[in-house]
Amino acid sequence: MAKYKIAWMPGDGVGNEVMDATKIVLDTLGLDAEYIHADIGWEYWCKEGNPLPDRTIEILKDTDCALFGAITSKPREEAHEELDESLKDKGLVYFSPIVKLRQLFDLHTNLRPCKAYEGNPLNYKEGIDLVVFRENTEGSYGGVEWYPLPEKIYDTLCDNPKMVKWKEKGLENVALSTRIMSKQGCESICRQSFEYAKKFGRKSVTLVEKPNVLRETGGLMTRVFRDVAKDYPGIDAWEANIDAMCMWLIKNPFDYDVLVAENMFGDIISDLAAGLIGGLGFACAANIGDDYAVFEPTHGSAPKYYGQNVVNPMAMFLTAKMMLDWLGEADMANRLETAVAEVISEGSIGTYDVKGRGKGNSTTEVADEVARKLSAVNA
């Protein structure tokens, strides 16, 4: 019987290719795991009306963690048009399966390391080593929204004089998305960011928010951050507005260690940080709860590249490294990261985003090169 049971969710598009490449690497490492395929993504929305089938949820409940490739998401109208004809009159509404997974399994923490590896020609500032903590179940991704705006929702909010102008526009023309945050959610993500800084000797934690405009939700997050910071006197606690932070990260990325943010702002700032280390082809992530975790690269399904075997699998390899760390396989995790770093440093093998269009190696060739590095260590 295998030591680990891992839900294997390639998803859509190039998610399949980077997952196939990662299997080569994990097999070379010798991870004692059973990989259980689980259906997720656009295909199942189109033919079943559910991008996260119930059978997949049951598989995840019976596994130690999940490794996830990528999904395709489209706006409501486009999603409806691509449904099987037999499903179009069922009142189905598309939802993001990864967001639903985060909520179903209370994967409250999204951890995104952004580390520049020596030798990557896309790293114009080598040595960047940031970590983004993103609250993963609340905020702007809570999924509480309406279009058109129902009369009863308007009536609930109409005591606020600012709502009058929306009534005048006609509620049938108004969409409303919420940003709902709890003190508990804010405290959890802030405390985890400080604990991480304490454990790994990081000098500062920076809150990325917008409390001057989002006075209630941003104000709550800021107050909680300041309270939590008092428990960590040896770590600098800084605050920055999301718009200013985008500028400061470009200008002075070495000034920052750990960043913490609510859901939407964490998503924005981590993609910006990924741009500083070579792009989404090097950006990994983990969705972590108290008892379960789903690991995914931050890139999308890139349908225009699907089937070409050309996309960069390094983000997926580094995601697998995060999974190994979470499973307690620190030696394997370190070996994998070392192999990835060596391939990047040598620069002889790399996909088109690193070497230039028409000059890059295939996804599989990159996987084989990382596997060769691992085999050399094993020998």
Image (tube, rainbow, N blue to C red):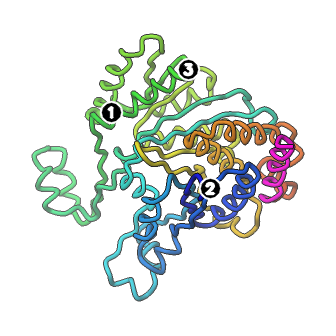
Residue 163 position within the rendered picture, expressed as x and y whole percent measured from the top left: 18, 49
Residue 74 position within the rendered picture, expressed as x and y whole percent measured from the top left: 48, 66
Please state which amino acid type lies under the numbered disc 1. Answer: Gly
1 or 2: tag closer to the N-terminus: 2
Look at mark 3 in the image and give the residue it sits on: 202
* Residue 373 higher or lower than 14, as above or below: above
| Residue stretch rendered in magenta on the structure | 363-379
2 or 3: tag closer to the N-terminus: 2
Look at mark 1 in the image and give the residue it sits on: 218
Q: Quadrant of the N terminus?
A: bottom right
Q: Is residue 244 left or right of residue 373?
A: left
Viewer-proximal residue among 108 and 151: 108
At x 30%, y 59%, the residue is: 175
Query: What mark, if any, has residue 33 been given in the picture?
Result: 2
Q: Quadrant of the C terminus?
A: top right
* Residue 171 higher or lower than 349, as above or below: below
Name which quarter of the figure residue 362 lies in.
Answer: bottom right
Residue 178 position within the rendered picture, expressed as x and y whole percent measured from the top left: 29, 49
Please state which amino acid type lies under the numbered disc 2. Answer: Ala
Instruction: Find numbered disc 1 in the image and state the secondary structure of the residue it sits on.
Output: helix
| C-alpha span from label 1 to label 2 | 42 Å
Instruction: Find numbered disc 2 in the image and state the secondary structure of the residue it sits on.
Output: strand
Nearest to viewer (mark 1 / mark 2): 2
Residue 68 colored magenta?
no
